[in-house]
Amino acid sequence: MAASRLALRGKAAVPAAVRLCRQADALAAAGRAEEADAAYRHALATDPALAGAHNNHGNVLRALGRIEAAAAAYRAALRCGLDVGLVRYNLAAVLRQAGRLEEAASAYRHALCLDPDYAEAWNNQANLLRDRERLTEAAIGYRRAVAIRPDWTDGHDNLASALYLLHDRGEHDTAARLARDWRRDHPDNPVARHIGSAIAGDSTEVRAPDAYVRQTFDLFAAEFDDRLAALGYQAPALLIEAVAASGPAPSGQFQVLDAGCGTGLCAAGLRPYARHLSGVDLSGGMLARAQARGHYDALHEAELVAHLRAHQDRFDLIVAADVLCYFGDLFDAFAAVAGALRAGGRLAFSVERLTDTDDGNTDNGNTDGVAFRVGTHGRYAHQPAYVLNALAASGLRVVHTTEHTLRHESGEPVVGLVIVAVTPG
Ligand SMILES: C[S@@+](CC[C@H](N)C(=O)[O-])C[C@H]1O[C@@H](n2cnc3c(N)ncnc32)[C@H](O)[C@@H]1O
């Protein structure tokens, strides 16, 4: 469309404007936004009808934080005849940033009329609806996005969050219906399976699937430390305190495993105990951050139970901070820990305590009551008696138990147990 307009212009002006425009595009691609801005201005002064240049100029202005100017540039592209989904989508994004939400909503509607298969537009329109508490509509929008791009992890993650919020707001039936539809349409997607089942209330999984853990934490890795700090996350500090209270001196004598080490928040506290400190985690994204801390002697990208089974009689101290909440059944995990610990070795871990008000609704068939339950956020909470039984079954003897707020969730404290258990000496 832009090219046919250009052909109508005077011969000398057209190539010059196009050349300037290409220079501006190259500067923008190189991240030289101020220079690109000047080059677009020059190009558009030469030929104000270059619709594509107006759109690209809008992108540069947005990158420079000049939101109103960006909106004006996208509108100029539309006036020049480039009325396509992409420009309406760009316009919607800056209007949302400017807080002009009605106009942004209208621009997304327009984008989707022009291009109904525009997954990002469905997703971002849904973000706008979610911010305005229109959660059912938001969830439907995310479903449209992942229907178009079934492998889009951000889209699935956003849908999971919208359904979680909907459930949290008390709209359990709507959330469950949408969750079942989501799971039905994406039976191979690990987030749809794990979170969909938790929200639908019919989970039969005994732990979070590896693919779910990997995908969730890879996506979360960059924000993990800041987000958890904002939630008042205490588990690493509490476990280090518990290890100290349970007896051993921090004199660098132990073979230590940080099990489910994540970004390595436990590492600094464990280092004084370690002759050798290793970490294991399913998420490469989390491990990359752990590596950057420089405290570990070795890091392994592996599933925890498999890793323990492959390292029999190897460790003096295993620490699992906020990791066993991704396991429902603890018998296998504790048996693997017991096998990987040397005589007299110790396990320090946290679990979330199951309460009557827990959100999840999966009864795992324990006739003495619910042993563990997956919440709508995807983590499991455990009945203390069940945890103690599972430890005893693996020959692990409890030497320290305390109850604490491990973190907050939706403004509420998440109460958990911090336990240290030892193998027979
Ligand atoms: C909430 S984070 C806690 C990370 C770290 N322990 C801390 O306290 O900051 C949970 C971590 O456990 C890992 N994880 C969960 N299930 C796992 C499994 N079965 N095998 C290995 N890693 C697992 C996740 O990838 C994630 O990095």
Image (cartoon, helix red, strand yellow):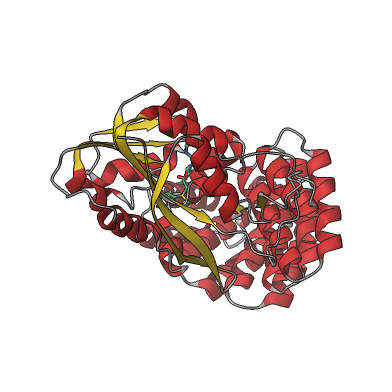
Residue 44, given in percent of the width and then of the height, sits at 52, 61
The image position of residue 363, as x and y in percent, is 76, 49
Residue 204 appears in the rendering: yes
Instruction: Indicate the position of residue 381 as horizontal and vertical percent values.
Output: 60, 54
Closer to the camera in the image, 421 or 260: 421
In the shown orientation, is residue 398 left or right of residue 144?
left
The quarter in which the C terminus is drawn is top left
Using the image as rendered, state which of residue 349 and residue 73 is in the foreground.
Answer: 349
Residue 34: x and y in percent read 37, 62
Judged left or right of residue 405, residue 153 is right
- Looking at the picture, does residue 169 appear above or below residue 317? below
Apparent side of residue 24 relative to residue 73 in the rendered image (left or right): left
**Front-most of 160 and 340?**
340
Residue 88's quadrant in the figure?
Answer: bottom right
Residue under the point 50% across and 40% down: 392
- The vertical placement of 65 against 50, above or below, is below
Outermost left residue? 251
Q: Which residue does the image show at 24% across and 52% down from the upper left?
A: 247
- So how many labels did they put on this image? 0
Asked if one can make out residue 115 in the rendered structure from this viewpoint, the answer is no
Q: Residue at 20% of width from left, 41% of height from top?
A: 274
